[in-house]
Amino acid sequence: MSSSSAPPDMQPPQMRDGASAGPPIDADRPTGGRLRLVMDRLVTGAVSAVSVAVALLTVSLVVALLVRSLPVLGLQSLAEMITGTVWHPLQGKFGFWPFIVGTLWVTVLAMLLATPACILTAIYLAEYAATGLRAVVRPMIDVLAGIPSVVYGLFGVLVIVPLVRDRLAPAAAEHLSGVPLLAPGKVSTGYCVLAAAVVLALMVTPVIISVAEEVLRGVSPGVREASLSLGATRWETVKHVSFRIAMPGLIAAVVLGFARAFGETMAVLMVAGNVAQLPGSLFDPAYPLPALIANNYGEMMSIPLYDSALMLGALILLVVVLIFNLLAELVLIWARRRSSQ
Amino acid sequence: MSHISVRNLTVAYNGHPALRDVSFDIPDRQVTAIIGPSGCGKTTFLRCLNRLIDVNNSVRVQGQVLIDGEDIFAPRADVMSLRRKMGLLSQKPQVLPMSIFDNVTYGPRLHGVRKRAQLEQIVERCLRMASLWDEVSGRLRAPAAELSVGQQQRLCLARGLAVQPEALLCDEPTASLDPISAQSIEQLFMELKNDYTVVLVTHILRQARRLADYLVFFYMGELVEHGPAQQMLSNPSDPRTRKYLEGVIS
Ligand SMILES: Nc1ncnc2c1ncn2[C@@H]1O[C@H](COP(=O)(O)OP(=O)(O)OP(=O)(O)O)[C@@H](O)[C@H]1O
Ligand SMILES: [Mg+2]
């Protein structure tokens, strides 16, 4: 071997020494090849099976609701029920429009109230707050996220509803008369769209702040420092750099909040007033879909088709949420594309 | 008297000193190379010069850094205009999440330049100075992240030049670059030092030899030796400097 024509420094000497080197590793054939391949197949199979099961669950949910709503769908057209404004089960009138509008009003208003405050709080915590303050505030926010919704509902009944009834509604009646949506139609009981939206906004706040802060903290310090070192202020850096990079994540945070707000039942049911009519102003009562289902399912089931109509209500809620998620997904794709530029 | 002078600068993170009582003058319009083993405080020193050290709130700075005779750590000091005066080039290129054009105009727009024609002029001038113009002039609207790493570093240089700084602070600016890109950055420093004071942190002794007019050696947070590069490289006075230059300590 020493007489071979290759120069001696072609290979490190210990590699030539068969005794000290391990068995040769063939790159094409992994060690213990068969077993590892079998394991790989098994895991792949298991993972796909679980994903398919989850997808099937969603589909079966839709199918079950659809099957149970067939009786009422056989009697009235879907379009008629969705756009119908009269809810009178005894007369066989199932108009869902007030409930759909109630759900949208309460949810959208809650998000309008919550989003700016949450994003600003997240910015403060991520970029401005001293480490000590943050260490105190973060756990408090996590505690808020864990409070059961019925407690938020009670808080709404005890604090928000009287506040709306005694202060906000009279003030609005005095200063905003004639303004559409904002002027109270009649004397407000306090159980209304606004109260429900405020309670809902309080509920989604911890979720949105938590996620948004995490996202903002994920922005690399290097890019932020590049902006600062060009003479940008902290706010300019947040606005032009952190925000841009974090935008997809911030949108995801708000979407998470929306998803929670749409389906929230208990707290809303306790303060929304639950009157099956189209709300004309923020101070009118509303009757969101989840509250309708929770209040009535299992009761008065002797009324023909009532049960089927509630199932249709659940299906409509599901579809509204799915449509919303789809739109959110599109916005997210757009934001990702934009923030990578 | 020189433009930038450091007086008794002491910096501690959470009570652990990273720089101890550093005093020297940084010569104007020359390349000052800061050398020393890892962890000796080079980055800390550089971040003091534009007060980027402030973003860390567990840090404590004592002593003074005088620029034109004014202490930049004085309570009334204008941090924004200080940072504008002291351009920064970091080890890894940090492009902003926007187009090539917007990266260069980011600083000027913050400082009030609004006219389109003027911004375009700035972009061309700075990209030419960073010898990037020929490579990107056709795609100024493309996201900066699409550039190669070497191009990104030159873009960062152009971006820093666009706010018309007086000094350039460079923290191992060629460390993440390929040899050709590194060479072109070094070439740029040779040209820029006629107009700018350049402070260059480097681990590469040969780079310091090639570029430095003035040399500063830190060791464990202390300023051990500083002086004209030729003299210090050929005849260091402190044994620790000699050992470092010989590669015994690193
Ligand atoms: N943010 C920080 N928090 C706490 N300690 C820090 C921080 N930054 C630096 N230090 C400490 O300060 C000392 C000097 O660090 P510095 O980054 O200035 O060294 P350096 O000379 O730039 O090293 P290198 O050549 O490896 O970049 C080190 O001991 C380091 O551990
Ligand atoms: Mg360093």
Image (tube, coloured by chain):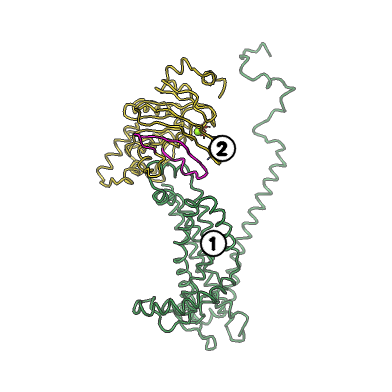
SS at circle 1:
helix
The residue under label 1 is A206
**Viewer-proximal residue among B212 and A258:** B212
User: Taking the image as drawn, is residue A52 in sight?
Assistant: yes
The quadrant of the picture occupied by the N terminus of chain A is: top right
Looking at the rendered image, the disc whose residue lies closer to the viewer, 1 or 2, is 2
Question: Which residues are drawn in magenta?
Answer: B50-71
The residue under label 2 is B16
Q: Which chain is yellow?
A: B
**Amino acid at dot 2:** His
Does the magenta run of residues contain A264? no
The answer to whether the residue bearing label 2 lies less than 8 angstroms from the nearest atom of ligand 1 is: yes
Q: Residue furthest top?
A: A3
Whole-percent x and y of residue B42? 49, 31
User: Taking the image as drawn, is residue A227 in sight?
Assistant: no
**Amino acid at dot 1:** Pro
Q: Chain of mark 2?
A: B
